[in-house]
Image (cartoon, rainbow, N blue to C red):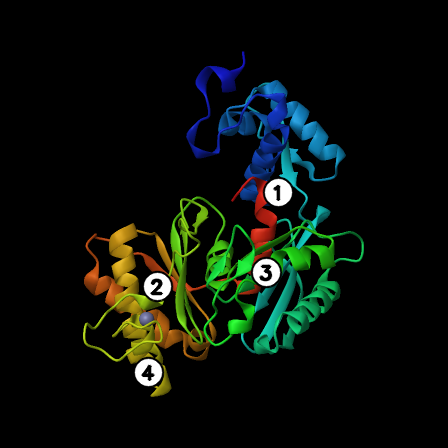
C-alpha cells in the first residue's frame, strides 16, 4: 500500500512518494529526527508522521545511515513482537556557519546539525567602511570558525535591513547609502565556495528562537527597534521581504518625528526613553508595540534580544510581560522571555534550514 499516494500528505510536513522528490523526503526524515532529539524515533513513527510507506522510510534511513547522518539510538520498548530499532540524528555529521553583521561588530558561530554552537568569534567591524572591507572581514571570520575537516553546509549572514532576501541584495540601510543594491550573497558565495543565505538580523533572530511548529515573534532592541516573525514554524518575510517593520508602527499620532518620515513611531519613542536611561519606559513602549502584534497574530511567545535588552534584561522582560498581560484579549497572554539564541546562531539556523526542508 502506498500511503502517501492514497491519503496525500498529512498535515504540513507530508512526504511525497515519488522518486524525483527523494531529496525532499530525506529532508523530512532528518527534520523529524532532529525534532525527536537524542531519544530518537522508530521507522514506524517516521512513516506515520511523513505519510510515507514503511518501505520508503527503510530505504531513506538506510541511505542516511550510510552517509553517517543517522545512527541507532537503541530499541523501542517491546510490545510483544520483535523490538524495533530507534534512529537518531548524528549532530556532528555536518556543520553550518552563521555571521551577524552589526554596525560596529561582527559575530560568527559554527553550529552542528542540532543547532548547537561549537565555536564563536567576535570582532569589531565598521559597517560604514563599505562592501570590500566587510566582505574581507566575513571571509576571515568564517575561516576562523569553520570546521577544517569539511566545508560547511552553508553560511547564513544576518545584516541590518532593509534587504531583498530572495535576491541576496542589500537595501537602503539607514546611514549607509554605499550598501544599496550590493549583491552581498553572490559575492560571499563566490569567495567562500559555499551556499550563502542573506537575511535581516531580525529574521535571523526569529529563525534561531526555537525549533518546532509554534509561532513566535522575536523583538530586537538595538540601534533600532525591529521584529522577526516565525509563524507555524517558518520565518515569515512578507511579499517584499519587508515584514516585521515593527519599529515604525505609530503609537502616538502627534509624537516626535521619526527617521522614517512618520511621527510617533514605536522606535523613536523607545530610543528616546533608552537615551534618557529609562529602561522601564522603553520596555513599556516595546510592550505596547508587541501587544498590537499579538492581537493581530496570536503568537505563542514573545522573545526579546539585542544590546539594549541585554543591558537591562529584567526591566524589559517584566515590563513587556506586564503590558501584554494587561492588554491580552485571551485568558492566557503569550510567554515573554529573553531569546535563548544569538542573532549569529539564528543566521546559522537559516543556513541549516534547507537541509531539513524548511524555508
Ligand atoms: Zn518610524
Q: Distance between the residues labelled 1 and 4?
A: 42 Å
Q: How many marks?
A: 4
Could you say which is closer to the camera, residue 56 or residue 146?
A: 146
Q: Is residue 203 visible?
A: yes
Residue 340 percent coordinates (x, y): 49, 62
Give the mark nearer the N terminus: 3 vs 4: 3
Give the mark nearer the N terminus: 4 vs 2: 2
Q: According to the image, label 2 marks what residue?
A: 246
Residue 277 percent coordinates (x, y): 36, 87
- Where 48 falls versus 321 (above or below)? above
> As drawn, which residue projects farthest toward the bottom?
276
Depth check, mark 1 against mark 2: the one in front is 2
Q: According to the image, label 4 marks what residue?
A: 272
In the image, what residue occupies the spot 25% across and 60% down?
A: 292
Q: Which numbered disc covers residue 157?
A: 3
Give the mark nearer the N terminus: 3 vs 1: 3
The N terminus: image quadrant? top right
The answer to whether marks 4 and 2 mark residues whose Cβ atoms lie closer than 8 Å is no
Q: In which quarter of the image is ligand 1?
A: bottom left
Q: Is mark 2 on a helix, strand or loop?
A: helix
Give the mark nearer the N terminus: 3 vs 2: 3
| Crowdedness near tag 4: few (<14), some (14–19) or many (≥20) residues, C-alpha within 10 Å | some
- Where 24 falls versus 263 (above or below)? above
Q: Which numbered disc covers residue 16?
A: none
Q: According to the image, label 1 marks what residue?
A: 355
Q: How far apart are marks 3 and 4 (CA)?
A: 30 Å
Amino acid at each position: 500500500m502506498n500511503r502517501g499516494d492514497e491519503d496525500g500528505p498529512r498535515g504540513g510536513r507530508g512526504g511525497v512518494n515519488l522518486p524525483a522528490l527523494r531529496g525532499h523526503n530525506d529532508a523530512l526524515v532528518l527534520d523529524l529526527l532532529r525534532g525527536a532529539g537524542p531519544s530518537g524515533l522508530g521507522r514506524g513513527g517516521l512513516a506515520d508522521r511523513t505519510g510515507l510507506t514503511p518501505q520508503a522510510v527503510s530505504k531513506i534511513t538506510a541511505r542516511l545511515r550510510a552517509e553517517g547522518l543517522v545512527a541507532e539510538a537503541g530499541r523501542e520498548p517491546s510490545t510483544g513482537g520483535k523490538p524495533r530499532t530507534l534512529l537518531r540524528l548524528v549532530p556532528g555529521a555536518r556543520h553550518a556557519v552563521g555571521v551577524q553583521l552589526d554596525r560596529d561588530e561582527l559575530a560568527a558561530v559554527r553550529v552542528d546539525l542540532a543547532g548547537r554552537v561549537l565555536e564563536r568569534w567576535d570582532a569589531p567591524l565598521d559597517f560604514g567602511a563599505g562592501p570590500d572591507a566587510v566582505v574581507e572581514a566575513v571571509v576571515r571570520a568564517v575561516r576562523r570558525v569553520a570546521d577544517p575537516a569539511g566545508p560547511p553546509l552553508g553560511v547564513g549572514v544576518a545584516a541590518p535591513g532593509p534587504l531583498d532576501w530572495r535576491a541576496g541584495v542589500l537595501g537602503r540601510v539607514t546611514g549607509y547609502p554605499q550598501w544599496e543594491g550590493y549583491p552581498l550573497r553572490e559575492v560571499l558565495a563566490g569567495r567562500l565556495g559555499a551556499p550563502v543565505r542573506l537575511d535581516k538580523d531580525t529574521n535571523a533572530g526569529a529563525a534561531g528562537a526555537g525549533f518546532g511548529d509554534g509561532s513566535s515573534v522575536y523583538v530586537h532592541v538595538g540601534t533600532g527597534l525591529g521584529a522577526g516573525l516565525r509563524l507555524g514554524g517558518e520565518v515569515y518575510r512578507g511579499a517584499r521581504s519587508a515584514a516585521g517593520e515593527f519599529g515604525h508602527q505609530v503609537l502616538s499620532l502627534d509624537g516626535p518625528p521619526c527617521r522614517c518620515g512618520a511621527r510617533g513611531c514605536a522606535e523613536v519613542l523607545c530610543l528616546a526613553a533608552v537615551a534618557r536611561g529609562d529602561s522601564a519606559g522603553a520596555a513599556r513602549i516595546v510592550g505596547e508595540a508587541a501587544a498590537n502584534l499579538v492581537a493581530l497574530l496570536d503568537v505563542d511567545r514573545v522573545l526579546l534580544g539585542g544590546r539594549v535588552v541585554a543591558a537591562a534584561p529584567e526591566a524589559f522582560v517584566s515590563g513587556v510581560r506586564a503590558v501584554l498581560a494587561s492588554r491580552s484579549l485571551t485568558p492566557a497572554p503569550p510567554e515573554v522571555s529573553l531569546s535563548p539564541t544569538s542573532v549569529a546562531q539564528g543566521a546559522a539556523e537559516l543556513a541549516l534550514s534547507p537541509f531539513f526542508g524548511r524555508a
